[in-house]
Image (tube, rainbow, N blue to C red):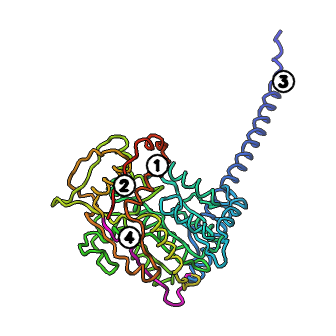
């Protein structure tokens, strides 16, 4: 008797059920994947659309392009300010800091406000009742803690410094959206002659690209601000006529730093000629004083003498002493404010010049060159400490052997007249230095010598 075949109906049903489950699961996965793919594609498409809208405006007339560009910047800066910590609170700080407290007072954007000259000028403007907003990127060219200390000092006088870079066009545009600045005091720059041999690109980025970035915004806002900016005595380069006059040739720079400042003067001429910007360049001569820059000779000589380190004193190749027209910070501040006070309004509107605008260049110096050896002697007397000196020939690193300012033009146009001799100025610097770095008590016991006469 043959046995009956096994019952496979249950197995078949189970396989059909499993097959059905796999199809359902596969369909769900496919649908989910499709949704994810669709959303991802949509997000990428939106990003690309915004990218091309912001970076490639439609082809049209220059005027329409200009207006379109401003709408873009306005939209982008509003987005950035709300997304990255700007917003109402930030705008309130900027407006409060920029509001003048005296009738017909200025509203000044000071670039490089945490720097040496910038911090002093900001305080002077604020103390006389002008509105001041600072801009600084707090870079590490020298100790940023000194810049932060200056920032804290300015904050005590209700001066707000916006931390940002000149090359950030969005930030600059946002600042002008919030405040219709009447003036710009442009002091931000990559300073130093020797450092250019180590990091040349930093000079191009700050002194040329940064300056152009600022001018691009300034030319387009309404009203256009008047601009006073820091050039340098370094532009005289290999010039041998003394004292240096604004009429002397400046086409032989001896360093990249000098070349970028000369380029700035030519760029200023261009924006004045095309867009009607009022521009005044100030050629500073070896500025020194309290809160100064640690890379300057008087500053690091003081430090090294106190620490018993040997200092290098340069001589020219033919054995002559190097001399500088040392200019005290308070005199420079008076010159900067005088230039601001006499700066005429820009004449452009909406990026177009309506009639010729003011274009000026001035020397701001002390008119009394002093040998570096004599400067060291004054510091030795103030510190009651003899310096360990190493006299060497000046290297070919861009420094020039001698500077001497003719300031007749600045005196004629806004009464610039330096009043601080080197001995008096260094006395104030050393007093600040030993106090700031906490070494005053020791010096008080030792410091009984009188400073040397600088006459």
Mark before the other along the chain sequence, 1 or 2: 1
Between 239 and 410, the residue placed more toward the observer is 410
Q: Mark 1 or mark 2, which is nearer to you?
A: 2
**Label 2 to label 4: alpha-carbon separation:** 22 Å
Q: Mark 2 or mark 4, which is nearer to you?
A: 2
Secondary structure at numbered mark 1: loop
Is residue 53 in sight in this rendering? no
* Residue beneath disc 4: 365
The residue at 67%/78% (across/down) is 103
Q: Mark 1 or mark 3, which is nearer to you?
A: 1
* Residue beneath disc 3: 10
Magenta-tinted stretch: 351-369
Q: Is residue 218 above or below residue 309?
A: below
Label 2 crowding class (10 Å Cα cut-off): few <14, some 14-19, many 20+?
some
Could you say which quadrant of the image residue 409 lies in?
Answer: bottom left
Which quadrant is the C terminus positioned in? bottom left
Mark before the other along the chain sequence, 1 or 3: 3
In the figure, is residue 169 to the left or right of 178?
Answer: left
Disc number placed over residue 451 in the picture, else none: 2
Mark before the other along the chain sequence, 2 or 3: 3
Secondary structure at numbered mark 3: helix
* Residue beneath disc 1: 143
**Residue 45: % across, % down:** 64, 60
Could you say which quadrant of the image residue 238 lies in?
Answer: bottom left
Mark before the other along the chain sequence, 4 or 3: 3
**Residue 301: % across, % down:** 35, 50
Contact, mark 1 vs mark 2 (Cβ under 8 Å): no
In the figure, is residue 30 to the left or right of 57?
Answer: right
């Amino acid at each position: 008797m043959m046995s009956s075949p096994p019952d496979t109906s249950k197995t078949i049903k189970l396989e059909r059920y499993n097959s059905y489950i796999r199809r359902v699961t596969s369909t769900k996965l496919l649908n989910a994947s499709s949704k994810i793919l669709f959303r991802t594609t949509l997000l990428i498409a939106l990003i690309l659309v915004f990218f091309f809208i912001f970076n490639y405006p439609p082809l049209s007339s220059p005027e329409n392009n200009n207006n379109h560009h401003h709408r873009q910047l306005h939209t982008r800066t509003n987005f950035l300010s709300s997304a990255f910590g700007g917003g109402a609170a930030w705008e309130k700080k900027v407006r409060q800091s920029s509001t003048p407290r005296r009738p017909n007072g200025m509203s000044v954007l000071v670039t490089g406000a945490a720097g040496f000259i910038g911090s002093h000028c900001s305080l002077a403007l604020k103390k006389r009742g002008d509105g001041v907003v600072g801009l600084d990127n707090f870079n590490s060219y020298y100790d940023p803690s000194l810049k932060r200390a200056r920032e804290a000092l300015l904050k005590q006088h209700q001066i707000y410094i916006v931390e940002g870079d000149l090359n950030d066009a969005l930030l600059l545009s946002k600042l002008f959206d919030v405040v219709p600045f009447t003036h710009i005091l442009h002091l931000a720059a990559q300073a130093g002659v020797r450092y250019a041999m180590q990091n040349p690109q930093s000079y191009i980025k700050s002194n040329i690209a940064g300056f152009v970035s600022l001018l691009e915004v300034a030319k387009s806002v309404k009203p256009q601000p008047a601009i006073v900016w820091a050039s340098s005595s370094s532009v005289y380069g290999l010039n041998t006529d003394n004292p240096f006059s604004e009429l002397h040739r400046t086409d032989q720079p001896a360093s990249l730093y000098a070349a970028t400042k000369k380029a700035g003067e030519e760029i200023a001429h261009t924006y004045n000629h095309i867009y009607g910007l009022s521009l005044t360049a100030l050629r500073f001569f070896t500025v020194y004083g309290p809160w100064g820059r640690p890379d300057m000779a008087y500053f690091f000589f003081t430090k090294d003498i106190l620490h018993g380190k040997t200092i290098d004193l340069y001589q020219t190749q033919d054995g002559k002493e190097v001399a500088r027209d040392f200019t005290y910070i308070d005199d420079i501040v008076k010159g900067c404010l005088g230039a601001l006070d006499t700066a005429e309004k820009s004449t452009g509107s909406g990026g177009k010049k309506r009639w010729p605008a003011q274009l000026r260049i001035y020397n701001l110096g002390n008119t009394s060159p002093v040998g570096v050896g004599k400067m060291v002697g004054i510091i030795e007397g103030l510190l009651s400490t003899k310096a360990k000196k190493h006299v060497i020939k000046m290297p070919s690193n861009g420094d020039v052997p001698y500077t001497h300012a003719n300031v007749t033009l600045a005196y004629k146009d806004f009464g610039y007249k330096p009043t601080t001799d080197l001995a008096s100025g260094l006395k104030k610097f050393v007093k600040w230095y030993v106090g700031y770095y906490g070494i005053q008590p020791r010096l008080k016991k030792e410091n009984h010598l009188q400073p040397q006469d600088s006459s």
